[in-house]
Structures are given as C-alpha cells and as structure tokens.
Amino acid sequence: MGNAKKRLKEILKDARKLTLCVDGWSKKGLTASFLGVSACFYHPPGGRVYHALLSLHRLDHPHTGECIARCIDETMVAWDIVGDKVLLVVTDNGSNIVKAVRLLSERPRQEIEPSAHSTRLPPGDGLDDVSWEEEEPESESDEENGDISESRDFDDGKFQRMPCLAHTLQLSLKDAMKHPSTDLLLTRARKLVHSVRKSSLANEALIKKCGKTLVRDCSTRWNSTFDMLRRLLEIRTELNQVLEELGMDTLLTSDWSKMENLVTLLEPFAIHTD
C-alpha cells in the first residue's frame, strides 16, 4: 500500500493538469453512504493516461455541500494536489455536490470547516487501497436529482465543474420516457412484469422454459427500464407460452413492436451510461 501510494504520488507530480471525478453512492437499504474521489490525468514521461482512485470516504447524514467539500479538500491535501493543477471537477448534478465545488472555489482550504459527517476509511478496510487504470497510449490522431447546471468558470481559476456526461444523458432520457406513448407502453410493461413476478407458478414455469425471469426496473435509473424491456423481448416467446398456459394476459402485438423500436433506439445510450 505504501509503495503504491508513493509511486502514484510521483506520477501525479509529473502531470501538468488533472481532472477530479467525484461521485457518491449508498449501499442497498441505505445502511451506509460513500464518496469516491478519483483523478484522471496524462503522464508525459510515460506517455499514458491514468485514472486513479485517490480516496473513499464514508459519509454520515446529512450529505451537505460543506461535508463533500471537506472530503475533496482532504483528498487534495493527502495527495499534494494544488488547486491550479485541477483542470476540471466532474460530478453529477446534485445540488449538494455542485455547492461543494463552489465552496472549494470561493474559499481557501483552511477556511473550510472540518466536518463531523465524514470518515476517511482506513487502509485496513480494503476500500481505500490505491488503484489505478492505465489506458493505452493515445494515437497522434486522436461520471442526484438536482437541476442540470452548466460548466462554470470561477473567478480564481481554480475549479471548473463539468457535469458528468453519462448522468446528464440519464436525466435527458428520463425526460424522454415521459412522452405519452412511451409512458403508456412502460406502464403496460411494468404491469405485466409485476403480474408475472408475483406469481410463483409463472416464475417457476418461465425459469423451467428458459432459465430466466423478468426484470423489474428502478425509478432512479433509466438503465434498469432498458434492461426490463430488453429482457421482455429476449424471452418473449417463452413468456407468451407461459402466459397462455396460465390464462394470463400478454401485451398487444403493437406494444411488442413499439418495444422493439424503443430498445433499438435506446441501446447506444444504454451502452454509454451503464
């Protein structure tokens, strides 16, 4: 651990500029929340691009902008990263994380009060170990429900926040899903999935026929809606056989056709936002 961190610090020193990527997530059941801070940069001597996880903080509620700002600041101090070396800070569009970047830009580090709502996980937990991905050398030709905010240049030039492209795409696609015809199709698809999954007979019969069952979607992630639709199409034949055997209703032929078109349209977005 010590040698790896020392090596990464040396590599970081050679980078002229870097991008910080900041994201938070919670364990299933909201039993714990975490904030990860990573750095993406080009290493001139080695001619390579690196993406390195710098720190992982455990957050206690409330997840305020002040708390998140403190975690980012502590990470920069720990890795000897000065403010003018940070080209961009990539985040989602949550109001708390947007505020955190603004706080860092408006005040010197020492003015950001220590927060009692975060804990930097010790190396022994296995979550704070240094890890980095080394990308292939570049050819010569060659990262939550707040409002979407545009990238912003701050007066001191230290930070420019860039909204995560994948997250912004997800928000745009969630809006697209609200179109009346799409919303009606999704309502019917969810009703079918719910009916099948709550029936032990239907589930068992479906698993016997194809070894798979239907997938429920999650309102906070559009990708899960795509997965639900794709699975419906994937096992459509076996599903309709089971529904017919059990006397349960299936979707209209026109619904299946619309679903095929929708999945074809959304697949490229699913690849880039997964």
Image (tube, rainbow, N blue to C red):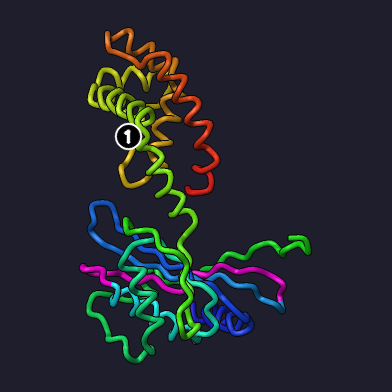
When the figure is inspected, residue 47 is found, relative to residue 200, above or below; the finding is below
Q: Position of residue 88 (x, y in %)?
A: 51, 72
Q: Main secondary structure of the magenta part?
A: strand
Q: Residue 56 appears in which quarter of the rendering?
A: bottom left
Is residue 158 rendered to the left or right of residue 193?
Answer: right
The residue most toward the bottom is 110
270 or 31, which lies in front? 270
Q: Residue 67 appears in which quarter of the rendering?
A: bottom left
**Circle 1 crowding by C-alpha within 10 Å: few under 14, some 14–19, many from 20:** some
- How many numbered marks does the figure carry? 1
131 or 216, which lies in front? 216
Residue type highlighted by circle 1: Arg
Q: Is residue 246 magenta?
A: no
Q: Is residue 54 magenta?
A: yes
Residue at image position (68%, 69%) is 48
Q: Which segment is the magenta one?
A: 46-64
Residue at image position (45%, 64%) is 150
Is residue 267 rendered to the left or right of residue 222?
Answer: right
Q: Position of residue 85 (x, y in %)?
A: 55, 82
Is residue 33 rendered to the left or right of residue 55?
Answer: left
125 or 13, which lies in front? 13
Residue at image position (51%, 68%) is 131
When the figure is inspected, residue 121 is found, relative to residue 138, above or below; the finding is below
Residue ID for mark 1 = 216
When the figure is inspected, residue 31 is found, relative to residue 211, above or below; the finding is below
Residue at image position (29%, 63%) is 33
For label 1, the SS is: loop
Q: Position of residue 12 (x, y in %)?
A: 58, 80
Q: Position of residue 97 (x, y in %)?
A: 35, 68
The residue most toward the right is 140
